[in-house]
Amino acid sequence: MKLFVNARFLTQPISGVQRYGIECSLQIKKLYPETVFLAPRNILHHELAKELNVVVTGRKTGHLWEQLDLYYYMLKQGDAPLLSLANTAPMFYQHNFVTIHDLAFFHHPEWNSKGFSMWYNVLVPRLAQVSRHIFTVSNTVKNEIVQNYKIAPSKISVTYNGISSVAQRLAGPDMEKEKIILSVGTFNVRKNQQNLVKAFIESGLQNEYELVLIGDVNKVFSATGLDADTMQQQRVRVLTGIADSELISFYQTAEIVVSLSTYEGFGIPLLEGLYFGCKILCSDIPVYRELYEGYASFCDPISVSSIVQELKKATEGDKVVEREKVNLLLERFNYERSARTIIEKVSSLCSGSRKGK
């Protein structure tokens, strides 16, 4: 079997979807070295592309590259399987294997531009129907795909996220915890940082703690009615564009990691927080209950008073999840295991097709 991987994620800034694509690809390269990684010419992450020995093909970029250049390239490869790890794939190719990370665009089209939501609500349902197999990052999302797109459960495999190779490489020795409450994630309404800021200020914890928010852009904070000077006075730091080493340093020194998303597919920052010995507070949503029950405290992300109450409890308690228990979770949630699942499923289905011919 010759496996091809759609590596268009290398042309995009790294968030959770791209991290999954990168880490699964690195593991697939180790486990199945003959894999061919394909990307358009506008690559951002050149060292990763070199490590994966990426083949640059076509003249277009973005969705046009994927739907045209990649599609026609794959037609020349016979019946070769194409693995797409970041939600999208050429919709008319007959041998797609695709990872669908979540259905946020389906449940809340208002969270994205009208064009984005319309395109995803056309593309992803078709991919779900015609792909040879679907991968996703939690049983919660698997159930959503089954229910909303009428897909047989046997057609979907769960391949969890894990701790990135970057985080493992930069971790170093344990560092002393500081009075820091940390939230990591793209700044948008879905991630709900605005309610975290409101709750932190109402809690009075700024007399002892600092709230550090790490993401990309900060226009979401207009919803709080707070300007940058006010947040600075209330010991709220908003950081963008930081290096991986600085992010890891914050994880190592933060006492509490918080994610108050109103919808998620997995929630990588919570797993990273556990890995670095932080206490975890998260929104009471189905996917977080599935993945982090017994590891985290939960609150109503819409209720500022609920967030205040649980933030105070987290700062007052000194209990951190035992390392042995975290290690058991990391055995389930890791990219090598997910890559093995992917390779085994693709190999099984492709060998079955050949035997049927």
Image (cartoon, rainbow, N blue to C red):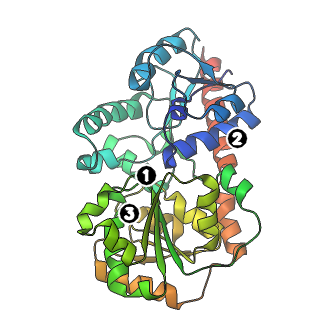
* Amino acid of disc 3: Ser
| Most distant residue in the front direction | 229
Outermost residue, top side = 76
Which numbered disc covers residue 229? none
- Left or right: where 327 falls relative to 86: right
Residue 224 seen anywhere in this rendered image of the structure = yes
Residue that badge 2 annotates:
27
Q: Nearer the viewer, mark 3 or mark 1?
A: 1
User: Which structural element holds mark 2?
Assistant: helix
Per the model, the C-alpha gap separating discs 1 and 2 is: 27 Å
Q: Residue at x 56, y 74 (%)?
A: 295
User: In the image, what residue type sits under mark 2?
Assistant: Gln
**Residue at the extreme bottom:** 316
Query: Residue 217, how many percent across, how many down?
Result: 38, 52
Horizontal side of 213 relative to 108 (left or right) equals right
> What secondary structure is marked by label 1?
loop
- Residue under numbered circle 3: 261
Residue denoted by label 1? 216
Q: State the image coordinates of residue 347 (x, y, percent, origin top left).
A: 66, 30
Give how far across and how far down residue 288 sits, in percent: 46, 65
Question: Which badge, 2 or 3, is on the more N-terminal residue?
Answer: 2
Q: Quadrant of the C terminus?
A: top right
Q: Secondary structure at mark 3?
A: loop
